[in-house]
Image (cartoon, helix red, strand yellow):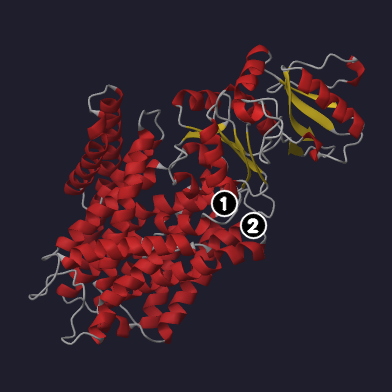
Amino acid sequence: MIELAGIVILGIIAQWVAWRLKLPAILPLILIGLLVGPFATLFTEDGSKLIEPIWNGRKGLFPGEGLYYFVSLAISIILFEGGLTLKRSEIKNVGPVITKLITVGSLVTFFGAGLSAHYIFGLSWQISFLFSALIIVTGPTVITPILRNIPLKKDVSAVLKWEGILIDPIGALVAVLIFEFISVGEGQAYTMTALIDFGKILLFGFTFGFTFAHGLAFAIKKDLIPHYLLNVVSLSVVLLVFIESDIFAHESGLLAVVVMGMVIGNMDLPNIKELLYFKESLSVLLISILFILLAANINIADLELIYNWNTVVLFAIVVFLIRPLGVFLSALGSNLKFKEKLFIGWVGPRGIVAAGIASLFGSKLMLRGEPGAEYITPLVFMIVLGTVLLNATTARLFAKAVGVFLTKSEGIVIIGASKISRLIGHYLMNNGRHVVLIDNNETNINKAKKIGLEAFTANIFSDSLTDNIELNDVGYLMALTGNSDINKFAIKKFGKQFGENGSFRLVDTDEMIDPENNPTEGLFSHTDDFIKLMEAARKYPAIHEIALNSQEHYLDLIKITEADEDIIPIFIKTPEGELKIISSHSDQFKDIKNGYSLVYLGKMFDIDQSALKTKVAGE
């Protein structure tokens, strides 16, 4: 009982430490696992581990293969949650690169790492290529924390995110085929077994994943599942899909749950966000438990096997030669720049799938007496821990060094997707700005998507926004909801992360009627709140531009807008096309001259048409 509670407590402490230090949680989790596992044997009186994952006759949490059954089920839930986050819209520009990374890149890693392990450690070809198959996978749970605090182009983040999720079942598939090769033996028997297993994994993985995804979606849409049971029913369906698919084709369950997650994640499904929040929380708990258990299961003797310079050489070849080579070959002919390829080649941390399957296959082969099997688990853990440590400590510096670090984050997050937000967002998008609308109202989000805007449903009171690596290029925050409390909360919680160049919110009614109460983050005008904006947009749903010729001209127009409720200034446009957000302090711009324009919402200015340049948003 103490051990079980201790794993959960230590796991959550590790997650908190990782959050505070902005590190991938896998790093403190593995270190804790090693401390309570193999390293503890050096200090305890009887030479035993503080936490013994597998029953050894005296103590242990899981009998027989119970640990690996638990690992397999937990990984299925983690991969399903990852599949839910994969949106087709993210890969419009980089789809071919991702496809090549999980095919060509996998082949480069498989053969390169296999050859290296064979010649450096003198392992048999079978064990060498089993090792290389296991390190094909990267890991979304490791990559996401690394990228979360690095401002990158959306395409670069999307490539790493999608690769990390999709490559997990592929690596598992290759590892299974090599394991079968070792078990069955080479020759015609293996060839037939491999072909049959490969076909079965693809067939049952895609079939079960696709079928059950649509079945669950149908049940949700028809309200066949009560709201309070939605999350647990979904969880049980994921486990059912994983187990059923695995029964028909061994190791096809991972592919099935990823496919299921992708299909559901790209459906217009009610309550999908609630499902995702639940799975995120569950994934955090499972990852915390898994890494401590798997690290604690390693023995000191296993670590002594790889405590030499051969390990350093193998690690260097895998990280500094094989990974970049696979990336550059996969990105041939793509729109990615050289520096972006270099960064993607640098970031390739391995994660939970590699560690879990390595522990399973390594132990099974050791029980069969396979020569060299004792190297599998420690070598894979060395790659996992080393790549995570390297990428976690150097990714940000490396991004700056190669020039992919966005020093000027021009993206804009708009909290709220009402008509006002959609009008402003559409104008920004047409002027070359990356804009994302966030709302918990599905109807508003769907309307935004129909006009081509990037938008997603989210609860700003959740921490999920801070985990969204697609928002890494965002530097401005505009809170445009009709709820002043939400607007203020958004500024307070997300202003530092998404509003480094400027955080703004609409003034509330109390502030509007009190000229002395003009907040520094006030947006557009001190006399226009959400109600006035909506009314102006209802009567005149358009955004216009009017040419400016001097600072005095600008101030004169601002006075007109203050007297006319149907004209609301929103941006200043420079001669170079740069848009500057107008705040409620109208005296913020001091250097306006000929060539600048005032961008405003609502009714057109009633002045001499020769001075007017009009542009309606969307035209």
Q: Is residue 387 left or right of residue 566?
A: left
Q: Is residue 55 left or right of residue 283?
A: left
Q: Is residue 152 left or right of residue 125?
A: right
**Amino acid type for the residue under numbered disc 2:** Val
For marks 1 and 2, the one nearer the N-term is: 1
Q: Secondary structure at mark 1?
A: helix
Quarter the N terminus occupies: bottom left
> Vertical placement of 85 versus 570: above or below?
below
> Vertical placement of 258 versus 557: above or below?
below
Q: Is residue 317 left or right of residue 93?
A: left
Give the image location of residue 136, x and y in percent. Answer: 40, 61
Residue 540 falls in image quadrant = top right
Residue 596 falls in image quadrant = top right
Marks 1/2 in contact by CB < 8 Å: the verdict is yes
Give the image location of residue 164, x and y in percent. Answer: 43, 54
Q: Nearer the viewer, residue 223 or 337?
A: 223
Q: Which residue is mark 1?
A: 156
Q: CA distance from mark 1 to mark 2?
A: 9 Å
Q: Which residue is mark 2?
A: 404
**Residue visible at 28% across and 59% down in the picture:** 177
**Amino acid type for the residue under numbered disc 1:** Val
